[in-house]
Amino acid sequence: MSIKQYSEYTRAVLASLFCVCLSAVWVAAATADIPAGQRPGCPERCGDVEIPFPFGIGKHCAMQTKYPFDLDCLDVNGTKKPFYNNNEVTKISVQEGKAWMKLGISSQCYDHVTGHMLYDSNATADFDGSPFWLSTENKIIVIGCQTMAYMESDACSQLLGLIIHMQIPQYVIGCFSSCNDSKPVNGSCSGDGCCQMDVPGRIYRYEGYFDEDYNDSKIWRSSPCSYMAVMEDKAFQFSTTYLNSTVFNDTYKEGVPVVLDWVITLDTCEKAKSNTTSYACVSTNSICNDDPSGGYRCNCSHGYEGNPYIKDGCEDINECLDNVTYPCPGICNNTMGSFTCSCHQGNYMANGTCIPNRKSGFLALPIHIKNHYFRRHGGLLLYEEMKSKQGLAFKIFSEEELQHATNKFDEHQVLGQGGNGIVYKGHLKDNLEVAVKRCMTIDEQKKKEFGKEMLILSQINHKNIVKLLGCCLEVEVPILVYEFIPNDTLYHLIHGNYNSWHVPLVTRLRIAHESAEALAYLHSCASPPILHGDVKSSNILLDSNLSAKVSDFGASILAPTDETQFVTLVQGTCGYLDPEYMQTCQLTDKSDVYSFGVVLLELLTRKKPFNLDALEHEKSLRHDGTGATDDQIKNNENMGFLEEIA
């Protein structure tokens, strides 16, 4: 690979570090699909697919806005199927503001005998001028040996360009797949026979194509076919049969599944409401939601479900019929838009549980203590917040549940220990593996708001951020419950027993890219914005595919609306701390960016950020980072590229 070609590819990877995170994160309710709802006289289905308004079969059944919402219902080999601009539609969700379609594959195949090209096709998709754009739930997938492929498109947001009336330059993003270093493995798409990249936010159109310097007739013996596709991440699982056969093409000959987000118009809710004739949220008990990157959608109000785009389309939910989503340990009574929960006579409600009234002091005392801690840590405020929000996966755990999950916090269950607490591996009653963190201390000023802040953190839904599942507040210092990530940390990959492993530059940059995306989401897309406060390699977990998962929000704060509002004690980890933060004690998003820069140096040099045994001028990596590139990536191609972007 030439320095120029390497630079073009890797620069495309790095370019995505600076794409503003514009996609809203929508959490699907843990209930069955809600009936679509359509205008009177209009078909509610096309074949097996529900067609909810504002979409419709034909213009007379679809909402009329700047964007076309009309679909065609066509007969395909005796089966009715809906299409939007010649793309087959497989599902539409009003609640999530998403649609699923089948889009084409870019492919090149050589004759396995002669080596001559059999067919060569570049897939394209164009949703410009439509309500749709590519969701970040998709991945750019490249399959083949010695295969380099790209997705070429406009920059992160064409919509942004439309709003401010300026042209945004084009860019490319893709990856290189080879079969030289190791044997490809089923289910793994990390560079051996298969590679993948994230799709940036708000992409309207793209073309997939191959780099002819790599996809030539020399590869036909090892992998006669090469493929590039943009497709839904969770719908794809790599198979080694894709490399030496046409199985991938045969499986997806009608197109790969792709997720698209959509809005009604580019207007904000405030502007849309000013025009009563065109405002789309027409049902009573409906609300309007602004998309962070432009446009609006409608949803049913809390406690209601259905279609907010049609009159009386939002209907009351009977919460008493769904004890999983709306738990009630006692007597449940449905009300319009809500429900009440009370205990049977002789019992009282505490920590979401009905507890018998007991007169014995030995039982009353521990219950009193637990209730005291629960209230002190904002448990009642948290409980009220949870009641007002629909479909939350966040849970309040009891101390007994977590003791059982961790075998009474057995030292053999310890996963790690840091300045903020000890993390244990646990198994919940449903066999779900979790990471249970016993915090060391809690800021006295934060105690009353602790539960509410944990609820906000739990609503972070990003593939590169460890998910907060719940907390326990009935103990002196709260306990946090996270999703369990089975692999080790980035620190261990760089400095631990894996030190002899060869970690290619592309893999290091991908890990950096994914970590940067997570921080960009926390700073720019979370509401309110969140500052991590302790970005370091040991707080970046790696899954089985070496995908990054930013973890440990022990030092995190919710960003203040006024920068002068927040001053904190210096916390974090030596070697990663922003010098300005150490002087002012004021945590900002720039503090996280500085710490991430140290992690980037750590990735490139494989040196620890702070070394007490080194010479004085070499103790800190930020002083000794230049000219210390790891020998594993110190070759002409890599160094040429690094010098070019330095």
Image (tube, rainbow, N blue to C red):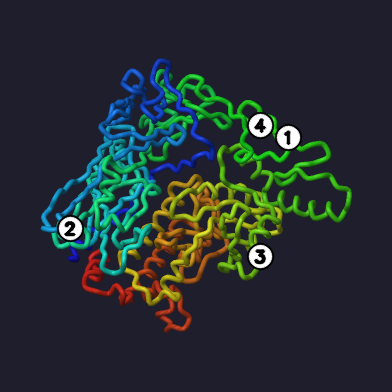
Q: Which residue is drawn at 52% across and 35% down?
A: 32
| Structural crowding at the residue carrying mark 4, measured as other residues with C-alpha within 10 Å and reported as few (<14), some (14–19) or many (≥20) | some
Total labels drawn: 4
In the image, residue 251 above or below residue 617? above
* Residue that carries the numbered disc 1 in the rendered image: 331
Figure quadrant of the C terminus = bottom left
Figure quadrant of the N terminus = bottom left
Q: Quadrant of residue 184?
A: bottom left
| Kind of residue at disc 1 | Ile
| Element class at badge 2 | loop
* Residue that carries the numbered disc 2 in the rendered image: 215
| Structural crowding at the residue carrying mark 2, measured as other residues with C-alpha within 10 Å and reported as few (<14), some (14–19) or many (≥20) | many
Residue 418 in view, yes or no: no
Left or right of 9 in this view: 606: right
| Kind of residue at disc 4 | Phe
* Residue that carries the numbered disc 4 in the rendered image: 339
| Element class at badge 4 | strand
From the top left corner, tell me how far across and down residue 13 is, in percent: 30, 57
Measured in 3D between alpha carbons, the distance from the residue under mark 3 to the one under mark 2, in whole angstroms, is 54 Å
From the top left corner, tell me how far across and down residue 630 is, in percent: 33, 75
Measured in 3D between alpha carbons, the distance from the residue under mark 4 to the one under mark 1, in whole angstroms, is 10 Å
User: Which is more N-terminal, label 3 or label 1?
Assistant: 1
Q: Quadrant of residue 134?
A: top left
Left or right of 539 in this view: 352: right
Give residue 409's mark: 3
